[in-house]
Amino acid sequence: MTEPTRLTGRMVAAARALAGISLEDLAAAAGLGLETTRLAENSGSAPLASPDQAAAIGAALEHFGVLILEEAGGLGAGVRLKFTRLDVKQIARLEGEGGPAGDDDVP
């Protein structure tokens, strides 16, 4: 995501629908309050007012496997999934396992 201020409320709503995440989960991942996140999403087609909020929401969406697509080649901005929901759950599970990394070369 090159310009986080280009993120709009409609893009946030579309991204949440694609990723299948709740507003509460998005707010928690972004480190924002629920009402702040709700107001950002309800801003419609206007770019999010706060660059800091846009960056936080954009990073949270990327955490859930959403790519933010900027306007290019005569096409409008949008969102798409980087991974399937199952892939995102697997990645989150693997990242949360912890423990020391072992050598995976078997003699």
Image (spheres, rainbow, N blue to C red):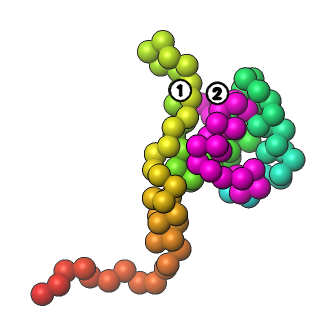
Left/right placement of residue 107 relative to residue 77 reads left
The residue depicted at 51 percent of the width and 38 percent of the height is 80
> Viewed as shown, does residue 94 lie left or right of 30?
left
Q: Secondary structure at mark 1?
A: loop
Which quadrant holds residue 101?
A: bottom left
Give whichever of 33, 84 is nearer the camera: 84
Residue 105 spot, x, y in % from top left: 19, 80
- Residue for badge 2: 6
Q: CA distance from mark 2 to mark 1?
A: 8 Å
- 29 on left or right of 89: right
What kind of element bears circle 2?
helix
Range of residues picked out in magenta: 1-26
Q: Are marks 2 and 1 in contact (CB under 8 Å)?
A: yes
Type of secondary structure dominating the magenta stretch? helix
Q: Residue at x 47, y 64 (%)?
A: 91
Quarter holding the N terminus is: top right
Q: Residue at x 52, y 50 (%)?
A: 65
Q: Type of residue at label 1?
A: Glu
Q: Name the residue at 79% across, 45% down.
A: 37
Residue 107 to residue 80: above or below = below
Query: Quick check: can you spot residue 30?
Result: no
In the image, residue 59 sits, relative to residue 8, either above or below, namely: below
Which residue in the rendered view is the most extreme toward the top? Answer: 74
The x and y percentages for residue 59 are: 60, 47
Mark 1 lies on residue: 70
